[in-house]
């Protein structure tokens, strides 16, 4: 059997590792437009900051493909697919036949229509090439503007700050990390970021990037001009479905997949940031572009392609772990529910130490949580949420600093600690 | 595979498991040096939860389908092919705490002494029986097939 995988990140590795657990004979081909051996895109901010060396970017050992018997076509772009003939076509016209296909092309930066976007000095920040480009531009830059105060924008801003660049972050919403945090958690991080010297401009946006040739300034929505030599566009990522537009593949926001990671086309699977899959908290299909989800979906797709049908996707949910200005924060699920919709919210905040904990319940189950400043053992909460465990008997314990398995009723504790999966 | 199980009914909360675990994972493996001389001091990978007379030691469960392995974006966490144990390469770890976020046992800790990195049980690789099991004075920890 020939399995072709388009993409070479978390979902692809998840698939390869699952396939090879159960099948040594399938012929696996990985096709990626990036020329690199599998590396971790989230590490590029650490690389830009100079905290890790280039060798550390690699997500798997150098002999990963060899040991997994994977043929690689790296630096090669898939431009279209003919699903009827079970063929994908590369940029140079070469055709690759498959019996089963996994689309794990990931996300790509969302670029708004904006004057001056094509100028040298304007970058995105999702790939290694982006980090290298920014690095090379730093020699001639004293200031940078990051558009977007989300996870990527803030990691970019921190890295630039560490490179002694004066950074301004411009965010459209009224607080940073508006998609993953609530206002309280954001305000703690905002305070810390400002203390580190990062300028935060919220409820505002960049309207135009100006300059004679290169970047000289940006014009904000309120008319203000910010001098800068570098602009990082980090508004968000969207599924990278370009090669499949105009085909019969069902795409809404991303490629729609079921619990077997199947698309609407037989023998075509999709996994990772490119998909739109079931969210077990929101009970709807959405994109959840996070690393653990990508690996897990890739793994399920791998098992399914290898004929192991019992492994199914039970749905995921949003979660993020980010450390900004030395403050670790974990957000899980629904962190900022709409008011009085049957949600119960528990909160505990210590402003002076910047420690904040929030747990959101719907009925008797946890549907969201935030840990700021103190994140140890947050995973227990994630586990209870994931498994839909009823917390009725120990609701009051959820905010305790000592929250752990001692807080659980004995039968539940024993069930969770002793019956291992 | 063999895993460590706790019997909370007989755990006295003496925390000797924590002490011996720390020493075992110290550079010198000497109890005095591990506590008084080594800087940064290593963390015990087992920790005792306690509430009133209830207590038990808890460490990585070395799950078969491990959430931490899926979440680790640096590639620092990996499964030892021979033993099935989940091990951690500190050099590769950047301290993103994705593993802390997903471990349903809360068994991965942040080690902030020295280089910021995750810290977890390695089942005392190379030893027939993990040190915490060996040193528990009341046999509250068992190392057995699961």
Image: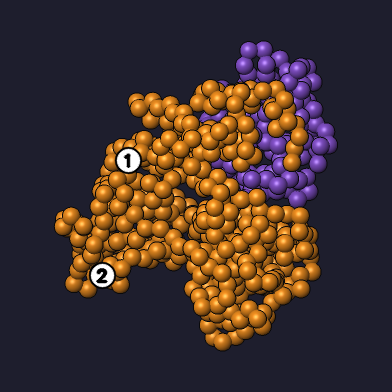
Chain colours: A orange, B purple
Indicate the position of residue A242 as horizontal and vertical percent values: 49, 73
In the rendered view, would you say A260 is above or below B29?
Answer: below
Q: Residue at x 34, y 54 (%)?
A: A148
Indicate the position of residue A78 as horizontal and vertical percent values: 55, 77
Q: Which residue is mark 2?
A: A116
Which of the 4 image quadrants contains residue A311?
bottom right
C-beta proximity under 8 Å, tags 1 and 2:
no
Tell me if A90 is positioned left or right of A21 in this view: left
Indicate the position of residue A149 as horizontal and vertical percent values: 35, 50
Q: Which residue is mark 1?
A: A190
Q: Residue at x 69, y 28 (%)?
A: A412
The chain under label 2 reads A
Q: Which mark is residue A286?
A: none
Q: Residue at x 43, y 26 (%)?
A: A348
Quick one: quadrant of the N terminus of chain A? bottom right
Question: How dense is the environment of label 1, judged by Cα within 10 Å: few (below 14), some, or many (20 and up)?
Answer: many
Residue A200 visible in the shown view = yes
Q: Residue at x 49, y 46 (%)?
A: A320
């Amino acid at each position: 059997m020939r399995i072709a995988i388009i993409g070479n990140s978390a979902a692809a590795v998840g698939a390869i590792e699952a396939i090879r657990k159960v099948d040594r004979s399938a012929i696996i081909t990985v096709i990626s437009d990036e020329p690199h051996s599998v590396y971790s895109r989230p590490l590029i901010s650490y690389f830009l900051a100079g905290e890790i060396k280039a060798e550390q970017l690699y997500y798997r050992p150098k002999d990963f493909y060899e040991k997994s018997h994977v043929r690689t076509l790296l630096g090669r772009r898939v431009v279209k697919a003919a699903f009827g003939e079970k063929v994908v076509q590369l940029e140079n016209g070469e055709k690759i036949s498959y019996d089963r296909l996994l689309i794990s092309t990931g996300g790509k930066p969302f670029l708004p229509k904006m004057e001056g976007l094509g100028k040298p000095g304007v970058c995105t920040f999702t790939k290694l090439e982006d980090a290298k480009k920014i690095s090379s531009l730093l020699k001639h830059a004293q200031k940078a503007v990051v558009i977007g105060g989300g996870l990527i924008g803030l990691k970019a801003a921190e890295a630039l700050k560490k490179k002694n660049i004066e950074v301004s972050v411009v965010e459209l919403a009224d607080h940073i990390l508006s998609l993953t945090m609530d206002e309280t958690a954001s305000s703690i991080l905002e305070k810390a970021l400002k203390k580190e010297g990062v300028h935060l401009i919220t409820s505002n946006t960049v309207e135009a990037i100006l300059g004679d040739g290169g970047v000289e300034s940006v014009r904000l929505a309120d008319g203000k001009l910010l001098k800068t030599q570098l602009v990082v566009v980090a508004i968000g990522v969207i599924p990278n479905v370009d090669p499949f537009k105009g085909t019969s593949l069902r795409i809404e926001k991303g490629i729609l997949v079921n619990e077997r990671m199947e698309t609407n086309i037989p023998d075509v699977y999709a996994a990772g940031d490119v998909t739109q899959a079931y969210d077990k908290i929101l009970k709807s299909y959405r994109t959840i572009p996070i690393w653990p989800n990508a690996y897990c979906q890739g793994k399920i797709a791998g098992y399914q392609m290898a004929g192991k049908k019992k492994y199914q996707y039970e749905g995921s949910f949003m979660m993020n772990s980010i450390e900004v200005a030395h403050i670790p924060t974990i957000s899980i699920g629904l962190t900022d529910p709409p008011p009085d919709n049957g949600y119960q919210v528990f909160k505990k905040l210590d402003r002076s130490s910047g420690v904040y904990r929030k747990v959101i319940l719907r009925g008797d189950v946890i549907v969201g949580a935030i840990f700021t400043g103190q994140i140890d053992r947050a995973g227990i909460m994630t586990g209870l949420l994931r498994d839909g465990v009823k917390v009725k008997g120990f609701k009051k314990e959820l905010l305790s600093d000592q929250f752990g398995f001692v807080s659980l009723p004995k039968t539940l504790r024993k069930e969770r600690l002793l019956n291992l999966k | 595979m063999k895993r460590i199980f706790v019997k909370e009914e007989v755990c006295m909360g003496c925390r000797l498991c924590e002490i011996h675990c720390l020493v075992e994972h110290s550079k010198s493996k000497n109890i005095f040096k591990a506590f008084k001389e080594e800087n940064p001091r290593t963390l015990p990978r087992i920790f005792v939860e306690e509430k009133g007379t209830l207590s038990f030691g808890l460490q990585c469960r070395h799950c078969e389908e491990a959430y931490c392995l899926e979440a680790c974006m640096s590639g620092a966490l990996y499964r030892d092919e021979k033993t099935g144990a989940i091990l951690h390469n500190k050099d590769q770890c950047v301290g993103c705490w994705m593993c802390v976020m997903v471990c349903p046992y809360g068994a991965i800790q942040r080690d902030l002494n020295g280089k910021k990195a995750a810290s977890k049980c390695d089942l005392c690789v190379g030893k027939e029986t993990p040190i915490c099991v060996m040193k528990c004075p009341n046999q509250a920890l068992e190392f057995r097939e699961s």
